[in-house]
């Protein structure tokens, strides 16, 4: 029962923070929406900051589960890579606690968000390395140094999660992550150079 109450509070807090932002989300509203007493929230978490911290943890778990679940249906390393890229880029375009800076205009929680992103990135790198190692074993990928390849591809994926482009503009959230992922997949697997035709 206690786990259910905790999950209900966190799920409600996540939903409200996504919609209203961390500054405009107060524990009175969370308690009312979760149908618990405000004192119950304090008993479980102690503070609004702790609610937010654990909501970030929960978000990482949900995003990780989403990637792995989608990959489970992929029959080959190539398909797994395609799914990994699509899901990783899609989550950046969605309203999540990790990738929407407008949730914290006061910058009070930026360090927590940055730390949470680092943790998610570490999980993504671990998943990606597993894909590349499997592909190398099966002769699908030519990657003499899997660790280096993982690091490079990982940082390319991470670049999509930056809060602004070099010009200072916000990232295009209306861009189709499927199209972007497909383009990145083609570049990674086929390269940019034109192969010489045999005479």
Image: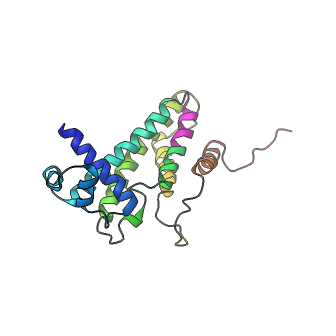
In the displayed structure, does residue 176 sit left or right of residue 71? right
- Total marks shown come to 0
Q: Nearer the viewer, residue 199 or 99?
A: 99
The question of residue 173 being in magenta is answered with no
The question of residue 82 being in magenta is answered with yes
Residue at 46% of width from left, 40% of height from top? 128
What percent of the width, then of the height, locates residue 1?
Answer: 19, 36
What percent of the width, then of the height, locates residue 168?
Answer: 52, 72
Residue at 27% of width from left, 59% of height from top? 29
Residue at 13% of width from left, 51% of height from top? 43
Image quarter where the C terminus lies is top right
Q: Nearer the viewer, residue 80 or 100?
A: 100
In the displayed structure, does residue 150 sit left or right of residue 199? left
What percent of the width, then of the height, locates residue 166?
Answer: 53, 69
Range drawn in magenta: 75-85
Q: Main secondary structure of the magenta part?
A: helix
């Amino acid at each position: 029962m206690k786990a259910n109450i905790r999950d209900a509070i966190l799920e409600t807090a996540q939903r409200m923070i996504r919609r209203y932002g961390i500054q405009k989300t107060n524990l009175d509203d969370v308690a009312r929406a979760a149908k618990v007493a405000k004192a119950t929230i304090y008993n479980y978490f102690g503070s609004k900051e702790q609610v937010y911290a654990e909501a970030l943890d929960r978000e990482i778990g949900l995003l990780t589960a989403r990637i792995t679940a989608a990959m489970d249906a992929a029959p080959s390393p190539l398909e797994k890579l395609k799914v990994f890229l699509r899901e990783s880029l899609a989550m950046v375009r969605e309203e999540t606690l990790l990738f929407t800076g407008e949730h914290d205009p006061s910058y009070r929680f930026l360090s927590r968000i940055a730390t949470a992103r680092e943790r998610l990135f570490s999980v993504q790198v671990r998943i990606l390395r597993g894909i590349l190692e499997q592909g190398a074993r099966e002769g699908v990928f030519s990657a003499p140094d899997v660790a280096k390849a993982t690091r490079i591809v990982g940082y390319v994926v991470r670049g999509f999660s930056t809060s602004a482009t070099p010009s200072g503009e916000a990232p295009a959230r209306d861009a189709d992550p499927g199209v972007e992922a497909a383009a990145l997949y083609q570049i990674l697997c086929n390269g940019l150079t034109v192969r010489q035709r045999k005479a």
